[in-house]
Amino acid sequence: MGTVHAKEIEGSTDMDNPAPRTRGSIDFKRPAKVQRVLIEGLERTKEDLLIPKVQDTFTAENFEQVVKKCVESKAQLQELGIFKTVQITVDTCKVPGASETAYDVKFLVEEKRFEGGIHTSAGNNDVESSLTLGLNNLFGRAEKLTAKYAHTRNFRSKKNNQAHIQFTKPLNGNPDVRLIVGGYNTNTDVPLSGYKEASKGILTAFTFPSTLGSHIVQWDGVWRDLRALTRTTPFPIREQAGHTLKSSVHHTLTADTRDDKILPHTGYLLKAVQEYAGLGGNVEFVKLNSEFQVNREILPHIVVQLSTACGTMWGLGRDKRVTVNDKFFLGGPLSLRGFQDRGVGPQVEGNALGADAYWLCAAHVYTPLPFKPGLGGFGNFFRSHAFVNIGNVGALELDKSVKENIEQLSEEFRLAYGVGVVLKLGNIARMELNYVVPVRVFNGDCVNPGIQFGVGVTFL
């Protein structure tokens, strides 16, 4: 077994090609062993964090395996998120008495100390402007301290100001297994439900992978102050105003095999969230929410997508009361198209009250734009699609049978269909411009027939 050496940069060298400095053609099948691994350019990073990432290079038995193991080690070093660049050089071993098949592998790294910037991004029908400052590799083992202030304005006048600070630490050097602690302060105006909310909280989270997908287990302790947004806010919203202390734990499972997050051709997405509030404080409920999406390319560039989402919650405690800021809402250009944001379900004077349960299904057929302009280039960011979506809100009552609950949730379903154009905004969001025909609506629904525009990260 060889040795690993980590040291400061001593001189300049060419690190661009992971190949030995020998003349003539390279026989990748010839015997080769890694004698030493050197890591140059370290300032704060501890050696014990890096050694497991490069140790596998010593198992190579020929030159092809040496190159392959070096590339794999480079990927593991980059996954730590603490290096700007990682370069590799493979050279014959310079140790006196070393065999002709012995090689030295050198990794030249440049540490990433500070991060930050001013950014503008699109969210779920809103635009966020944010200032972020980050300190990487705080104690030399890939820890990160991040502070962020963001101002968000929704296309329907919803406003949100948020400040948070967060410390993240990988456990045992594994970037997929992390401990997160943080605090946050938010102020949100929600005109579609007639309230505003100020909240201050702390959180602790643990992330880890499994054969089922990635997991997040998180505890939140948050003080919330719910107030009427205007003097015209109706009484059913006003009577929920006041201070609450919520202590909750929730688990999120995500399994995502899609080849693209925004316009996938194949793969599926499964996301399930379970939340229990009542570990102290005066808010008590159980909340379940899930989403499933599957994609299949039936013909070249023609993709069928089927999606479903559902959720339910039950209030606990003496009065089983759940306030409007914890409930489910349905409607909008990226969920139940043909309806306004929060446009489905109980309303009072145009203010959505939310529901204790919902379900939603959607089917899409995506194709290139007519005549396929720019296909293979800029045209790949656009898709035309035809869709139909159906859904409803209500409540699951524990004193009723499963059949009775299903009948109750399905008897007043909403239905809409339409066509439109989808634009992919990088790998983080999408923009839709659709013409929608609501087919099945009920009194009190806020309908949006005809042209409907939306920008968002999540969609169904």
Image: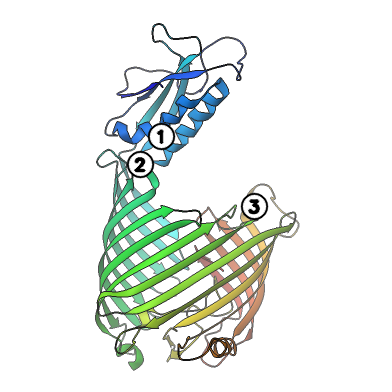
Secondary structure of the residue carrying tag 3 is helix
Secondary structure of the residue carrying tag 2 is loop
> Mark 3 or mark 1, which has the lower sequence index?
1
Residue placed most toward the observer, 243 or 358:
358
**Residue 380: image tag:** 3
Kindly identify the residue that appears in the image at 39 percent across and 74 percent down: 158
Distance between mark 1 and mark 2 Cα atoms: 9 Å
Q: As shown in the figure, which amino acid type bears the numbered disc 1?
A: Lys
Distance between mark 3 and mark 2 Cα atoms: 38 Å
Q: Is residue 366 left or right of residue 46?
A: right
- The x, y position of residue 360, in whole percent, is 56, 76
Residue contact between numbered discs 3 and 1, judged by CB atoms under 8 Å: no
**Residue 53: image tag:** 1
Q: As shown in the figure, which amino acid type bears the numbered disc 3?
A: Asn
Residue contact between numbered discs 1 and 2, judged by CB atoms under 8 Å: yes
- The x, y position of residue 252, in whole percent, is 43, 63
Kindly identify the residue that appears in the image at 63 percent across and 57 percent down: 382
Kindly identify the residue that appears in the image at 45 percent across and 32 percent down: 73
Tell which tag, 3 or 2, sits nearer the viewer: 2
Q: As shown in the figure, which amino acid type bears the numbered disc 2?
A: Gly
Note whether residue 142 is visible.
yes
Outermost residue toward the top in this view: 97
- The x, y position of residue 50, in whole percent, is 36, 33
Quadrant of the rendered structure where residue 49 is? top left
For label 3, the crowd category at 10 Å Cα-Cα, with few meaning under 14, some 14 to 19 and many 20 or more, is some
> Mark 1 or mark 2, which has the lower sequence index?
1
Provide the residue designation for mark 2: 173
Q: Is residue 181 left or right of residue 71?
A: left
Q: Is residue 322 left or right of residue 407?
A: left
Colour logic:
rainbow
> Mark 3 or mark 2, which has the lower sequence index?
2
Tell which tag, 3 or 1, sits nearer the viewer: 1
